[in-house]
């Protein structure tokens, strides 16, 4: 949000916004995280999946979603096994 505000202020002044690339990267991460959250909601409401299938699919998506957030914060990504152990 801070980068968005900086961009708006630069546009009002007619100046070039140097953080454009970073802002686009963060907006893309935000969209991807939102899409994964929608997928998780879809899985949760799917009557054709067993609880075990839902749990497995949701866990995998949560790892991806959390890794996107970690990347956005400049942190290393985690592997599924790091979070849930060796069993998949």
Image (cartoon, helix red, strand yellow):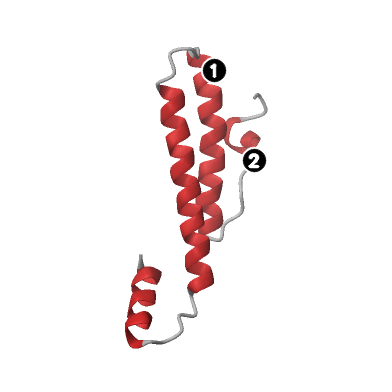
Q: Position of residue 77 (x, y in %)?
A: 61, 49
How crowded pointer 2 is (Cα within 10 Å; few <14, some 14-19, many 20+) is rated as: few
Whether 86 is drawn above or below 49: the answer is: below
Q: Position of residue 24 (x, y in %)?
A: 50, 64
Q: Secondary structure at mark 1?
A: helix
Q: Position of residue 56 (x, y in %)?
A: 56, 23
Tell me the distance, in whole angstroms, between the alpha carbons under discs 2 and 1. Answer: 19 Å
Q: Quadrant of the C terminus?
A: top right
Q: Secondary structure at mark 2?
A: loop
Q: Position of residue 8 (x, y in %)?
A: 34, 75
Residue 53, labelled with which disc? 1
The residue closer to the viewer here, 85 or 70, is: 70
The residue closer to the viewer here, 52 or 76, is: 52
Looking at the image, residue 5 sits to the left or right of residue 80; the answer is left
The residue closer to the viewer here, 42 or 72, is: 42
Residue 10, labelled with which disc? none
Whether 40 is drawn above or below 77: the answer is: above
**In the image, what residue occupies the spot 37% across and 82% down?**
10
Q: Quadrant of the N terminus?
A: bottom left
**In the image, what residue occupies the spot 49% across and 80% down?**
18
**In the image, what residue occupies the spot 50% across and 12% down?**
50
- Residue holding disc 2: 79
Q: Name which of mark 2 and mark 1 comes first in the sequence.
A: 1
Q: Are marks 2 and 1 in contact (CB under 8 Å)?
A: no
């Amino acid at each position: 949000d801070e980068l968005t505000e900086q961009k708006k202020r630069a546009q009002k002044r007619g100046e070039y916004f140097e953080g454009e690339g970073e802002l686009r990267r963060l907006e893309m991460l935000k969209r991807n995280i939102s899409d994964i959250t929608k997928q998780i909601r879809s899985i949760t409401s799917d009557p054709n999946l067993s609880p075990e299938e839902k749990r497995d699919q949701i866990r995998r998506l949560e790892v991806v979603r959390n890794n996107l957030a970690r990347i956005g914060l400049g942190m290393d990504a985690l592997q599924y096994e790091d979070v849930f152990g060796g069993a998949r």
